[in-house]
Image: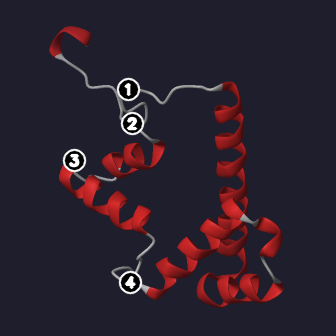
Amino acid sequence: MGHSEMLLAVAGMNESQIAERTNKLASGDWSAFTPAEQLVFRFAHRIARDPASLTDADVADMRKAFGIHRTADLIWYGGWCNYMTRVADTFQFPLERENCFMPAKTTPQSK
């Protein structure tokens, strides 16, 4: 299971909702999403594929939509996610089979 799917599950989506959302994201047709979401997806795609192509205008657009602090968060998080993916890919780490972000379920025996 990929981390995006895990985080969507933690956010409360069921398997069919997760599949629909990730398929829309992966398709590159983000027209079903809000303009702000589309802006972030384009930015994230570019930071992953060609970070040197980002311009001051791209950052200015993000600042208009999200403010300076949230834009800094988005840039930092996008860069960090790409870094972690490259490290994991280089070491050829497998994805987790179970959702490591879900809280452990307690049972009457575990109390």
Q: Is residue 24 left or right of residue 68?
A: left
Work out how far the residue at label 1 is from the one at label 2, CA to CA, in angstroms: 6 Å
Q: Quadrant of residue 25?
A: bottom left
Kindly identify which residue carries mark 4.
Answer: 31
Which residue does the image show at 52% across and 26% down from the upper left?
94
From the viewer's perspective, is residue 46 above or below residue 110?
A: below
Q: Do the CB atoms of the residues marked 1 and 2 lie less than 8 Å apart?
A: yes
Location of the N terminus by quadrant is top left
User: Residue 50: which quarter of the image?
Assistant: bottom right
How packed mark 3 is, by other alpha carbons closer than 10 Å (few <14, some 14-19, many 20 or more), is few
Q: Under tag 4, what secondary structure? A: loop
Real-space Cα distance between discs 4 and 3? 22 Å
| Residue 97, disc | 1
**What's the distance in space between the residues labelled 4 and 2, CA to CA?**
26 Å
Name which of mark 4 and mark 2 comes first in the sequence: 2
Q: Residues within 10 Å of mark 4 (few under 14, many from 20)?
A: few
Residue pointed to by mark 3: 15
Relative side of 105 to 5, left or right: left
Of callouts 4 and 3, the N-terminal one: 3
Q: Specify the amino acid type for callout 1.
A: Arg
Picture residue at 19% right of the left edge, 53% below the top: 16
Between the C-alphas of marks 3 and 1, the distance is 15 Å
